[in-house]
Amino acid sequence: MVKALQGPGPCLARGRGLWFHGEISFAVWVNMALNGLTAPFAAALMDRFGLRRVVAGALAVIAAGAALTTVMTEPWQLTLYWGVLVGLGCGSMAMAFAATVTHRWFVKRRGLVTGLLTAAGVFGQFVFLPVLSWIVDHYHWRAGTVTVGLTSLIVVPFVWLLLRNHPADVGLKPYGSHGFVPNPPAAPGTGRRTLKVLSAVVRTGPFWLLAATFAICGASTNGIMWTHFTPAAHDHGMPVTVASSLLAMVGIFNVVGTISSGWLTDRINPRWLLGSYYALRGLLLMFLPAMMGPTVQFPLASFVVLFGVLDVATGALCCAAAMLAVIIRRAGSDMKHGAANELANSAAASR
């Protein structure tokens, strides 16, 4: 939604003043930062309270943040409502949700399943972009924000009725398992255990190496493409709806890249995959400024296809989890519980 707000030009009208890209981008930064910082604690909450409650609660928080955004009048309110509330809600589902579902419901093909779940989430985001841009252009940005909030609320009852915490809840065994796996009891002290995991892994070199690579990943995807591509294309004379449609096409090809990445992770060392993805993505971004213009030409269309394939392939979690598992295993036996256990075991199976 913030992408759509940025589209109409260098600033957004507010009363008698203007909101510039820097003000909106700060709210986006808060949103993305909380999205990442929330993930480890979201996994712990899923251990303690179950998938259904956490996901339903996260969707409700997103809806509340979107609703409050419609009545904002100052940039700090955008940061609070969209940056903090929506960021917390999205971070509570994102990668932690995919990792938890994959570990609990699958024994085989975990890399492929993680890729599918990640692709589905990214594809949904980009499908919404042209729709939200059209709503903003023809009605108002508040109508687009209401659409986001209502969509989140509509999904809540489906989550509550259909989502199950564990295969044992419906009498099934995980896919690929040779025997029935009982649903483990809720683990107390998940918050303390999560802090213990984090305090241990931050003392290891591989963790910071992996964190640095994903910082570059976020800067080149969330920072450049997902946040600034539409307003930058508009500044070059391209209509907002066309630029948003290009991002939607990136999302479509994300599905191909992310699923393929998950499939490859089951067969190839994920470190080689990550290195290749980053190198190719960097080369594409180097040539992007020369491709921008008022119309879509063949070079820009080619960029959309290739960048789409590579964009979220690095974020399928299976690649990162396989590397992070080594760190968790070395940090100590106490980490083989809860969220850390899910991440490590999922990674080991993916390899």
Image (cartoon, rainbow, N blue to C red):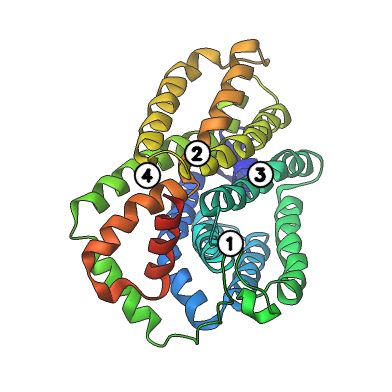
- For label 3, the residue is 123
Q: Nearer the viewer, residue 9 or 116?
A: 116
Considering every residue shown, the one lying at the far front of the view is: 178
Q: Residue at x 29, y 63 (%)?
A: 328
Q: Quadrant of residue 170?
A: bottom right
Look at label 2 and name its amino acid.
Leu
Q: Quadrant of residue 182?
A: bottom right
Nearest to N terminus: mark 1 or mark 4: 1
- For label 2, the residue is 264
Q: Is residue 37 left or right of residue 46?
A: left
SS at circle 3: helix
SS at circle 1: loop
> How far is mark 1 from mark 2, CA to CA?
19 Å
Which mark identifies residue 214?
A: 4
Considering every residue shown, the one lying at the far right of the view is: 138
> How far is mark 2 from mark 3, CA to CA?
20 Å
Observer able to see residue 8:
no
Q: Is residue 278 left or right of residue 203?
A: right
Q: Tell me the mark number nearer the camera, choosing from 1 and 2.
A: 1
Q: Residue at x 61, y 48 (%)?
A: 116
Q: Position of residue 79 (x, y in %)?
A: 50, 58
195 to 207, vertically: above or below:
below
Nearest to N terminus: mark 2 or mark 3: 3
Look at label 1 and name its amino acid.
Gly
